């Protein structure tokens, strides 16, 4: 039906009302105001300083800029970042 | 989140300082090997603080070697480390244990016994009865059965209606004495307590002697305890008229009843038209000092109050007195409020209102208890130009004025 494998899965997820992040292997990024960011389904940390955190995901690189960034938790599937978050970028 | 902290405390965790060229590699390696890190924070551009469970420190050293980072332990936190410390300092633990044991032991004795609620019964008697059941200072409190003490007290003291016993280091006995039945008064009249105009008379026993609207004097009989036979019908024959002889009372009772009368009270209030009033300026100063014996030492605040006119409030607090030892140290706080004097000119209406208020204050203070004000009337005495303005307040009240007054029956004397 769909040539593209990704498209097929997306259709399936839509049709069966499955959570897309699980089916499509996408990171789920939850931002709470500008003080907390939770990234589920990540692939590791590339850079970590107080002002910038770069996290590898299936989409590419997620760049968080801010002040006083702290990694609250690191699990194999979840990262929680606290601090004053100024910007978020996705670099494919 | 809080659960995680509790777990971390129970398992014990370490706060580590990680130094190295590439700490990101250290972090990635750690979580990919299942080592849980949290609260990562940079202290300086090249040192990272990491928290980690104590049991995962060993794999972490391996990871550190791989990533080329140096790891140093900054703090050890949690229950396992605490236990470890106590293992090394056995005596400290032992001391704590002895303390708890001693506290428990001492609190299982009865130290004091308070007795409340005794009025006619002597406290010593209650104390003695309680001691018979073991409730006395110095005894072991688990030997005392509360219910037994209560039953013993109720059995031995017929003049109490209720007893409550608390057994503890500080034991307490609470007693409620029986109310004594009012004494039979014998024959009596209800007489007026003060002058007034009768509003209602409700005779429950006895013969009412006055009607509503009658003026009564203090001491006048309102409900008589002596009951007279009904007056004979006047003889229709005018020739047959005899001077009616004073009749003898048929019987005597203890008069009972409720008597309400209207009573007037007058109150007076005045207010000058011109007055110098003291007003607070909202400037205050506090002086704190310690009183040692008879000497005062100022801790904070000026030595002298820097205002011309002021009002002071002094509060003293001292250490709680224990036994007969009085600590002669007092902490004194003096609060001085500056006031200024302001000349005030009142209009006639203002002065009248103030005078009326003062009269009403008087009324509130001086009206007897139980008197219900029915009517109030304010009247200005004198003319408008008078200074001060004087106001007379007349309060009409309704109050109970009946009091019982016993009397001796003179029937015997009459009979003999």
Image: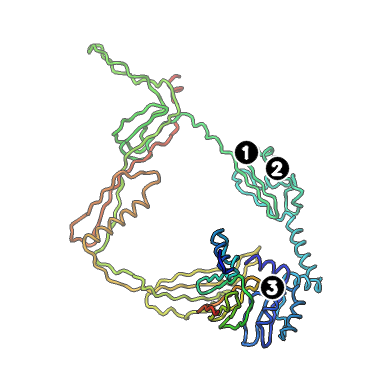
Horizontal side of residue B254 vs B28, given as left or right:
left
User: Residue B217: in sight, yes or no?
Assistant: yes
Seen at 36% across and 48% down, the residue is: B367
Which sits earlier in the primary sequence, circle 1 or circle 2? 2
Seen at 78% across and 73% down, the residue is: B85
In which chain is the residue bearing label 3?
A: B
Q: Are marks 1 and 2 in contact (CB under 8 Å)?
A: no
Mark in front: 1 vs 2? 2
Q: How many marks?
A: 3
Q: Which residue is mark 1?
A: B159
Q: Which residue is mark 2?
A: B147
Between residue A41 and residue B136, name the one nearer to us: A41
Q: Are marks 2 and 3 on the same chain?
A: yes
Measure the alpha-carbon separation of dots 1 and 2. 19 Å
Q: Position of residue B194 (x, y in %)?
A: 36, 40
Q: Which residue is mark 3?
A: B36
Tag 2: Cα neighbours inside 10 Å, few (<14), some, or many (≥20)? few
Q: Is residue A83 above or below residue B381?
A: below
Measure the alpha-carbon separation of dots 3 and 1. 74 Å
Between residue B243 and residue A4, name the one nearer to us: A4
Tag 3: Cα neighbours inside 10 Å, few (<14), some, or many (≥20)? some
Seen at 31% across and 68% down, the residue is: B277
Between residue B273 and residue A47, name the one nearer to us: A47
In which chain is the residue bearing label 1?
A: B
Mark carried by residue B180: none
Q: Quadrant of the C terminus of chain B?
A: top left
In which chain is the residue bearing label 2?
A: B
Q: Position of residue B409 (x, y in %)?
A: 45, 26
Q: Quadrant of the N terminus of chain B?
A: bottom right
């Amino acid at each position: 039906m769909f040539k593209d494998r990704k498209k097929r899965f997306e259709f399936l997820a839509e049709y069966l009302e499955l959570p897309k992040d699980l089916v499509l292997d996408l990171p789920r990024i939850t931002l709470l105001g500008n003080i907390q960011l939770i990234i589920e389904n990540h692939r590791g940390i590339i850079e970590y300083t107080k002002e910038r955190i770069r996290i590898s995901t299936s989409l590419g690189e997620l760049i968080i800029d801010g002040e006083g960034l702290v990694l609250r938790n690191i699990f194999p599937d979840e990262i929680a970042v606290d601090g004053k978050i100024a910007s978020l970028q996705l670099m494919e | 989140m809080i659960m995680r902290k509790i777990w971390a405390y129970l398992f014990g965790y370490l706060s580590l300082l990680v130094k190295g060229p590439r700490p990101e590699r250290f972090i990635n390696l750690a979580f990919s090997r299942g080592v849980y890190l949290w609260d990562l924070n940079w202290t300086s551009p090249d040192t990272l603080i990491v928290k980690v469970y104590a049991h995962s420190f060993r794999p972490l050293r391996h990871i550190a070697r791989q990533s080329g980072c140096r790891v140093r332990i900054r703090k050890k936190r949690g229950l396992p480390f605490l236990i470890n410390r106590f293992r090394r300092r056995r005596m400290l633990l032992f001391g704590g244990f002895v303390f708890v044991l001693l506290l428990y032991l001492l609190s299982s004795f009865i130290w004091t016994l308070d007795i409340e609620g005794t009025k006619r019964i002597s406290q010593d008697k209650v104390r003695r009865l309680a001691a018979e059941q073991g409730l006395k200072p110095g005894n072991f409190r688990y030997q005392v059965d509360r219910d037994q003490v209560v039953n013993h007290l109720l059995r031995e003291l017929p003049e109490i209606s209720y007893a409550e016993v608390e057994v503890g280091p500080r034991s307490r006995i609470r007693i409620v004495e029986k109310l004594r039945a009012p004494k039979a008064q014998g024959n009596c009249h209800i007489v007026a307590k003060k002058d007034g105009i009768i509003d209602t008379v409700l005779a429950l026993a006895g013969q009412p002697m006055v009607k509503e609207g009658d003026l009564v004097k203090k001491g006048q009989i309102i409900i008589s305890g002596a009951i007279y036979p009904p007056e004979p019908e006047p003889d229709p024959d005018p020739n047959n008229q005899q001077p009616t002889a004073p009749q003898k009372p048929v019987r005597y009772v203890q008069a009972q009843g409720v008597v309400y009368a209207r009573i007037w009270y007058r109150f007076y209030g005045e207010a000058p038209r011109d007055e110098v009033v003291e007003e607070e300026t909202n400037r205050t100063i506090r002086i704190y000092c310690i009183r040692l014996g008879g000497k005062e030492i100022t801790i904070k605040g000026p030595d002298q109050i820097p205002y011309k006119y002021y009002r002071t409030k002094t509060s003293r607090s001292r250490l709680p007195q224990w036994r007969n030892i009085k600590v002669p140290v007092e902490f004194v706080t003096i609060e001085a409020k500056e006031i200024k004097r302001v000349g005030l000119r009142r209009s006639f209406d203002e002065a009248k209102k103030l005078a009326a208020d003062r009269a009403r204050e008087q009324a509130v203070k001086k009206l007897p208890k139980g008197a219900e004000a029915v009517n109030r009337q304010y009247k200005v005495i004198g003319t408008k130009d008078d200074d001060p303005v004087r106001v007379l307040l007349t309060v009409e009240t309704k109050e109970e004025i009946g009091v019982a007054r016993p009397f001796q029956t003179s029937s015997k004397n009459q009979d003999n």
